[in-house]
Amino acid sequence: MQKQTLTMSDAISTAKMLSEALPYLQRFEDAVVVVKFGGNAMGDDAAMAEFARDVVLMRQVGVNPVVVHGGGPMINDMLTKLGIKSEFVRGKRVTDKATVQVVEMVLSGLVNKRIVQAIMDAGGRAVGISGKDDDLMVCVADDPELGFVGRPVEMNVQVLRDLYKAGIIPVVAPVATGMADNETFNVNGDTAAGAIAGALQADRLLLLTDVPGVKDASGQVMTQITPDEIRAMTASGVISGGMIPKTETALMAIEAGTRAVTILDGRIPNACLLELFTDHGAGSQIRS
Ligand code: X2W
């Protein structure tokens, strides 16, 4: 017989919790959920394993998760090792030819494969690709000041549908191809996730980050916000700094047809499950 690790009362509360999740499991059956997993939310191997388990659980209960990752801190580490200086302008990395090569190596290689491996270890199936594969994300230069930073202008998301329909979790690195031959662009991870969620008309975009959500003027996290409120709070300066690219991404994704976007703290245990499958939810949900 298997060794019992739970007390009877713990086991009863686990069973009750599963039962209470039923309406949420029904609601998200076959839903497309794009999860942006930022470099700051990745943490150590244990946090990575827990994220992978949540994504595999989503898949197991009939959700179609699509993972889009970042890796800014990992790019910084490699650039430092190679003695390449790097700076950010308006939240985006100024990217010259040497930098874009490092970005592609780190994101499509190290970070992408680490996530794929973690999902496989959790018993799921994952395939790692970048925005270059099957021309998933075609970009133009975002701003001449930023060099090879891409703004997605053409999305070909059929490859993602093909993968999730086959039961495979796509894991996407935010590196993209350009309109001309042989161009490589570095794309901000949030921007890439928003463009993918919009093109897939996703049911949810979850932006996992290292802050609890969008705060109002008194510093309280807002659990529900409309796009109009976001615009007003941005104009009045209540939304500022690093939150701006996230709320801009949310608005873009909603305009393109994503049903709702949640900005949440990826460091909370089981953040994705909390948001999707409990009545508590997590972070700030933006929807019309
Ligand atoms: C980002 C891509 C990685 C990213 C960069 O070079 O850092 C641009 O800034 P996080 O972990 O999600 O911040 N690209 C253009 O977005 O990573």
Image (cartoon, rainbow, N blue to C red):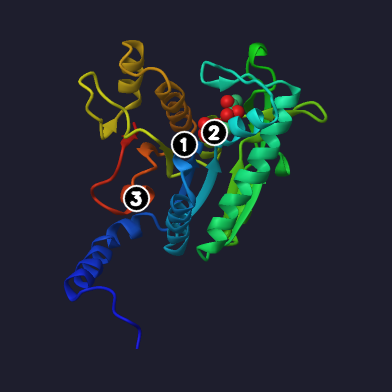
- Where residue 211 appears, x then y in whole percent? 35, 33
Q: Secondary structure at mark 1?
A: helix
Instruction: Work out which residue is located at the far right of the displayed protein and give it.
Output: 181
Mark number, residue 180:
none
Quarter of the image with the N terminus in it:
bottom left
Residue drawn at (45%, 58%), measured in percent from left and top? 53
Above or below, 122 relative to 82: below
**Mark closer to the chain start, 2 or 1:** 1
Identity, as a three-letter code, of the amino acid under mark 3: Pro
Distance of mark 2 from mark 1, alpha carbons? 7 Å
Q: Residues within 10 Å of mark 3 (few under 14, many from 20)?
A: few
Mark number, residue 40:
1
Q: Left or right of 178: which side holds 195?
A: left
CB contact under 8 Å: marks 3 and 1: no
Q: Secondary structure at mark 2?
A: helix
Of circles 3 and 2, the one toward us is: 2
- Where residue 65 appears, x then y in whole percent? 49, 52
Instruction: Work out which residue is located at the far left of the displayed protein and give it.
Output: 9
**Mark closer to the chain start, 3 or 1:** 1
Mark number, residue 269:
3
Q: Is residue 176 visible?
A: no
Q: Residues within 10 Å of mark 2 (few under 14, many from 20)?
A: few
Please tell me in which quadrant of the rendered image residue 72 appears.
top right
Residue drawn at (23%, 61%), measured in percent from left and top? 20
**Mark closer to the chain start, 3 or 2:** 2
Please name whichever residue, 159 or 237, is drawn nearer the observer in this view of the structure: 237
- Where residue 242 appears, x then y in whole percent? 43, 22
Q: Write down which quadrant ligand 1 falls in.
A: top right
Q: Which residue is mark 2?
A: 73
- Where residue 7 appears, x then y in whole percent? 20, 74
Q: Is residue 25 visible?
A: yes
Ligand 1 neighbours mark 1 (CB distance < 8 Å): yes
